[in-house]
Image: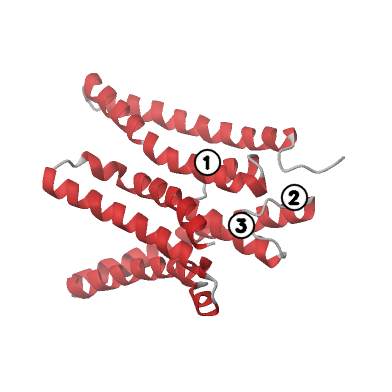
């Protein structure tokens, strides 16, 4: 049987897992609704909160759909659909898939047909690596939280600096991926600037969103700022790539 990244069996396997996750979501939604009623909350208010939360998930979902479409060229639809529907994130999945394919002599977006061994390799890297956070949180998070609380009691200023430093460190890890090919500019290859310019477009969109929130006091914009910045950033990659390639 010829291997295909879009084989019906892969759709069935991914669909079963996603169905289980959806069932869990519905279960906890029902339990939360019943708990709210038991606590004496107004049904109209509960309904308004549920509708509001559902509406605000539409914009972030657009960025996820675009990410699935981006990865599907090389990995098919089932794997990106599964990864971005359960635990994965757009930035991590793209980096993991790209690094794995480069290690195998290919490049993400090239459209090269993967064989079964290559497909399994990419799937393992994308899945196993992100699972570290699942088991690391219960092992490390409690001790880290206790340490942060103790530090905050002793010196709140240093506690804020430490917390901000950890966040900056996380961002720096992704920035390394953005700037890793900039040196190619010195050899005449301008494509190394593509991820940098895309990042700048997204950053400008986020700054503009913050400015609109501040000037017009429209706090609802902040709920859409991240997905809109992601979508516009990815859209800008098309003309930027055409310009620099």
Mark 1 to mark 3 CA distance (whole Å)? 16 Å
* Residue 117 image point, x, y percent: 78, 55
Element on which disc 2 rests: loop
Q: Which residue is label 3 attached to?
A: 97
Left or right? Give the position of 71 relative to 25.
right
Q: Which residue is mark 2?
A: 113
Of badges 3 and 2, nearer the viewer stands 2
Q: Position of residue 123 (x, y in %)?
A: 66, 52
At horizontal 61% and vertical 37% (from top left) the residue drawn is 17
State the residue in front, 30 or 130. Answer: 130
Cα distance between the residues tagged 1 and 2: 24 Å
As rendered, which of 21 and 228 lies closer to the eye?
A: 228
Residue density around tag 2, few if under 14, some if 14–19, many if 20 or more, within 10 Å: some
Q: In this figure, which residue is indicated by the disc labeled 1?
A: 85
Mark positioned earlier in the residue sequence (3 or 2): 3
| In the foreground, 245 or 89 | 245
Mark 3, Cα crowd under 10 Å, few <14 / some 14-19 / many 20+, is: many
């Amino acid at each position: 049987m010829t291997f295909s990244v879009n084989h019906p069996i892969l759709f069935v396997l991914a669909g079963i897992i996603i169905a289980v996750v959806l069932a869990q979501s519905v279960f906890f939604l029902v339990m939360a609704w019943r708990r709210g009623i038991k606590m004496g909350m107004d049904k109209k208010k509960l309904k308004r909160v549920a509708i509001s939360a559902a509406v605000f998930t539409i914009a972030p979902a657009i960025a996820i759909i675009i990410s699935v479409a981006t990865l599907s060229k090389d990995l098919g639809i089932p794997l990106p659909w599964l990864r971005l529907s359960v635990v994965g994130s757009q930035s991590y999945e793209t980096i993991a898939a790209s690094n794995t394919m480069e290690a195998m002599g290919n490049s993400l977006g090239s459209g090269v047909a993967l064989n079964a061994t290559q497909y399994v390799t990419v799937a393992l890297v994308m899945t196993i690596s992100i699972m570290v956070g699942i088991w690391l949180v219960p092992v490390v998070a409690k001790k880290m939280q206790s340490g942060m609380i103790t530090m905050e009691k002793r010196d709140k200023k240093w506690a804020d600096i430490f917390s901000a430093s950890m966040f900056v460190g996380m961002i720096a890890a992704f920035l390394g991926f953005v700037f890793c090919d900039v040196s190619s500019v010195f050899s005449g290859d301008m494509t190394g600037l593509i991820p940098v310019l895309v990042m700048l477009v997204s950053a400008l969109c986020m700054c503009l969103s913050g400015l609109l929130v501040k000037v017009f006091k429209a706090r609802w914009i902040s709920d859409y700022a991240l997905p809109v910045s992601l979508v516009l950033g990815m859209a800008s990659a098309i003309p930027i790539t055409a310009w620099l390639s």
